[in-house]
Image (spheres, rainbow, N blue to C red):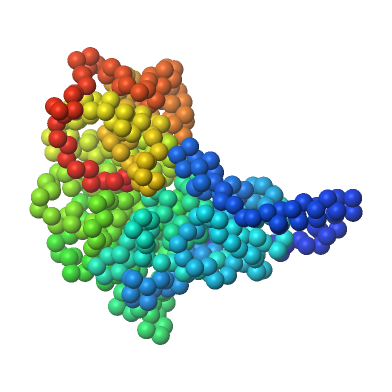
Amino acid sequence: MLHTPHAPTPRPRARSRRRLRAAALLASAVSVCLVAASAPPTPLGVGDRLFPQLGNPGYDVTAYDLSFTYSGDNSEPLKAVTTIDARTTADLDRINLDFAHGKVDSVEVDGEPAGFATAGEDLVVTPEDELDEGERTRITVRHSSDPVYPEDRQGGWVRTADGLAMANQADVAHLVFPCNDHPSDKARFTFRITAPDGLTAVANGLPADVDRAGGSTTWTYRTVHPMATELAQVSIGRSTVLHRTGPHGLPVRDVVPTEHRAALEPWLEKTPGQIEWMEQKVGRYPFETYGLLMADATTGFELETQTLTLFERELFTEPAYPKWYVESIMIHELAHSWFGNSVSPATWSDLWLNEGHATWYEALYAEETADKPMAARMKAAYGASDRWRTAGGPPAAPKPPKNGSKTGIFRSNVYDGAALVLYALRQEIGRPAFERVERAWVARNQDGTATTADFVRLASETSGRDLSDFFRAWLYGEKTPPMPGHPDWKQTPAAKAPAKAAQKAHGE
């Protein structure tokens, strides 16, 4: 049985050590603590260029243990317990967690009651004793998790026809559970979901236990690899879980509304072959399982939640979508397993590395399997690229969204606009070198985070050329540079721009 252990249980707080500090320092320390205690709690962040209030400094989360109890009514709050194992990276007298939608009943730090207050979208926890840099600590929050949101703050839980699913990108995991809600702090997850008999619960990772008692069932799932909070997934509903085998014996499991199982099966059976196709391009699939979660809900997007990708059921049952298009979107989301999930963005400005690559393989699959030439798509993207840069910023320096919604950064400049950068790179260094860059990128950064600068260095190293000027123009320029090998490609006036199919994959 695959098992992801918790981080070691934190040692008891060393009160005696603190109380035996030199008397000369004690008065000063008490004075500082009194000043700190009197200061009001304030929201913090990791200083992300686009969203500076997301995430929190001073600690690194190693594991989350999330327990949800579902009543059977998706308009009622779930009872929840979130346990966070972390290692401090600085001395802390307070711990800021991102949490903005739910009632907190109590907080403990290493088994001892702790004070708590809200500040902006932070839950500010004050432990009985301050934490020293390098300590392991465990924070337990008992709270509600509400699937009903105000109109101006949507996200997190998705209410489906028969239950719930999650869509936490980019910044709404902390509407579901307290966390360090930034992709730079990845951790392993354990999920424990209790629901009435007759419902099925599934989450990221592999099943670890099923316990039936008193008319309800508790399912436990654990991830083998670290995961960003935005990629967490929990599905609760009248679902059927289908199993098949992928490459190298990979367990593939799909979660579908039971009544639509037959209609969805022809699509689901394509997944093992699609995984094989991606492995031929960039190397072995990086996780312990994969599968599709077909949500009976209208979201307007698909989402690459790690090992269990969220799809709208209607994408597969709406006859207006051509077969090749649906399959290319399946590849887009699958490609995120390598680009975005295994290798996560260090900042949200690095989003182009996720979406540009997913769009690239989406287009490459359409070229190879459906006779949809990559060059034609890239020429059309080139024609619109200056307009995309004006509206949303260059691919690696996107503009903050005007309406405050974090999903506003998912614009064309980081989809086809970023895939255009990859096309230009392949034109510049040649196909063999480009393919080596792709494989090296996912192999070198597996289970970690990476930056645009990391990609530039790797491409330069792999190609044997300094590509700094090339990438500076393509990733940060206000105007699109000339396309290598295609001097005839020009910007297309807006009135003459070809219509583009609706982008289903909101980033996902």
- Counting from the top left corner in percent of width and height, residue 225 is at 46, 52
- Counting from the top left corner in percent of width and height, residue 109 is at 64, 64
Q: Is residue 343 above or below residue 212?
A: above
- Counting from the top left corner in percent of width and height, residue 26 is at 85, 54
Placement of the N terminus among the 4 image quadrants: bottom left
Residue at image point 45% right, 50% down: 228
Nearer to the camera, 91 or 252: 91
Nearer to the camera, 345 or 443: 345
Residue at image point 32% right, 21% down: 479
Residue projecting furthest to the left: 319
Residue 38 quadrant: bottom right
Nearer to the camera, 475 or 375: 475
Residue projecting furthest to the bottom: 214
Q: Is residue 308 above or below residue 458?
A: below
Nearer to the camera, 286 or 315: 315
Q: Is residue 79 left or right of residue 417?
A: right
Q: Is residue 206 visible?
A: yes
Residue 262 quadrant: bottom left
Q: Is residue 412 left or right of residue 439?
A: left
Residue at image point 90% right, 54% down: 23
Q: Is residue 431 left or right of residue 102?
A: left
Residue projecting furthest to the top: 487
Q: How many marks?
A: 0
Q: Is residue 330 left or right of residue 14?
A: left
Residue 324 quadrant: top left
- Counting from the top left corner in percent of width and height, residue 99 is at 50, 58
Residue at image point 24% right, 39% down: 362
Q: Is residue 80 above or below residue 416?
A: below
Q: Is residue 423 visible?
A: no
